[in-house]
Image (cartoon, rainbow, N blue to C red):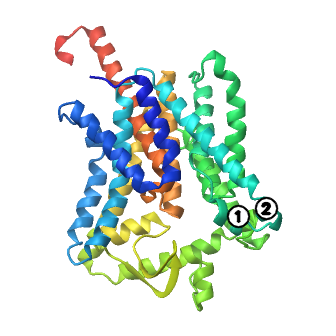
Amino acid sequence: MKVSRPRVIMTLFLLLVSDPLVGSRVTTLLLTMIVSWTILRRHFRVPKRPLLLLSLPSVLIVLGMVGSSSHYLRDVLKDGWYYTFPMLAVFAGYIIARDRRKPESLLLTFVAAGAVLSIWHLMEFFTHHNVLQSGDLSELRDQIGGGFMLSSVTPMIMFLASRNGVQLFHSRLKVLRWPIYGVTLLSVACAFSRTMVISALISLVAGLGWLTAKNKRGMIVIGAMAAILLSLNAVVPGDSSSFVGKFAQTREEISFSDFGTTADAIHHWRAYETFMATATYLGASSFQKAIGMGFGQLVDIGMDVELGGTVMREIPIFHNGYVYVLVKTGYVGVIVFLSYLARLYVVGARHADMSDRRNRMFGGLLMAMVGMVAVSTFVVSGWFNPSLMCGIMVLIGCLLSFLSDQASEAEIATYREVGRESYL
């Protein structure tokens, strides 16, 4: 039994558009319903390939549970949710795309969702003209947020499709390409987000195939970007109220370690929480350093601070997602997590090097999304940030399904060529 194509398209569109607006808890329920319904209509036959693809993230959950027995159940469940959500989103994306013979329609759904969210963001941006006149970006971001990641993903999809000769738009809709480019790129610019800009640039380098064993030019580009970014504070004063000032502040946010006063800690918050989390990890036993301190482990930040409307002294998660993995699942968990990202990237790289234009496009887009996840995990929790990255995780699942189908078609073609019944 197959669900009708329009119903799948509409479900995916509503999921992508509603996620940033209704919150990740509601999205978790929607994803769970999608997965449950798929399993039920398949008579409890769970697709094996996506489960195999999620085997490494499952190891992280096992590691996190090992050391969780001494922690409060509420904190354990919260960490478990952070680790489980991306797996759920990838799995849902895989099964949503599994029955689609024309993957372009699903990719076009991501494009449409990105355009709608970009228009929403621009409307919010220009209606806050009083904040715009003040010139304070910090206040503006507090009022309207930092934009949507799908705004940067949408032009990436269209660019890579055009570059590889894959037609996303029907002839009557081609006129929409440039307006969609316009609203999405303008939304990215108006978000004033370092994370979005940097991750988009690096994902573009990855999507172009410049970061592979055969092509090293991407390392030169990224090295030049890093050198400019880390040396910018020599000519521009760091200031979170201006966009260029935020870029200039990047080096201090990464390397600052002299937290003599509370003001220093607040001003360099990302560096401070990373510093405190690392100190907590270094105080653990050798066994805990290997497999982590477990789900539910909190980090004492040494002062009371308001985060997300709640005054806290101990925090469960950090902007640096790699440090988050280190504290909860140890250096073994970090190795597993990096291996998983590398595995996804290699899958994309192998297909991006094929002659088939669809394979090249899907492979390049998968590499781009993995690059986006890798960068954002360093600065905004990325893989463990459901409200920001849900659409990217679902897209990764869709791409893995597309590439799996392409591989199956290649196997069938080979079978027909060699004429051996035992091949399949």
Residue hosting label 2: 132
Place of residue 242 in the rendered image (x, y in percent of width and height, measured from the top left): 75, 66
Count of labels shown? 2
State left or right for residue 277 relative to residue 187. left
Q: Secondary structure at mark 1?
A: helix
Q: Are marks 1 and 2 in contact (CB under 8 Å)?
A: yes
State left or right for residue 314 relative to residue 20. left
Viewport quadrant of the C terminus: top left
The numbered dot on residue 327 is none
State left or right for residue 87 relative to residue 256. left
Place of residue 84 in the rendered image (x, y in percent of width and height, measured from the top left): 32, 55
Place of residue 43 in the rendered image (x, y in percent of width and height, measured from the top left): 17, 31
Which residue is at 47% across, 55% downward? Answer: 23
Looking at the picture, tell me which residue is in the foreground, 336 or 215: 336
Mark 2: amino acid:
Leu
Looking at the picture, tell me which residue is in the foreground, 232 or 5: 5
Which residue is at 18% across, 33% downward? Answer: 45
State whether residue 240 appears in this view.
Answer: yes
Residue hosting label 1: 140
Place of residue 357 in the rendered image (x, y in percent of width and height, measured from the top left): 51, 22
Q: Residue 157, relative to residue 314: is it above or below? A: above
Q: Residue 6, relative to residue 83: is it above or below? A: above
Which residue is at 64% across, 49% downward? Answer: 221
Mark 1: amino acid:
Leu
Specify few, some or many for label 1: CA neighbours under 10 Å numbering under 14, 14-19, or 20 or more. many
State left or right for residue 205 relative to residue 1. right
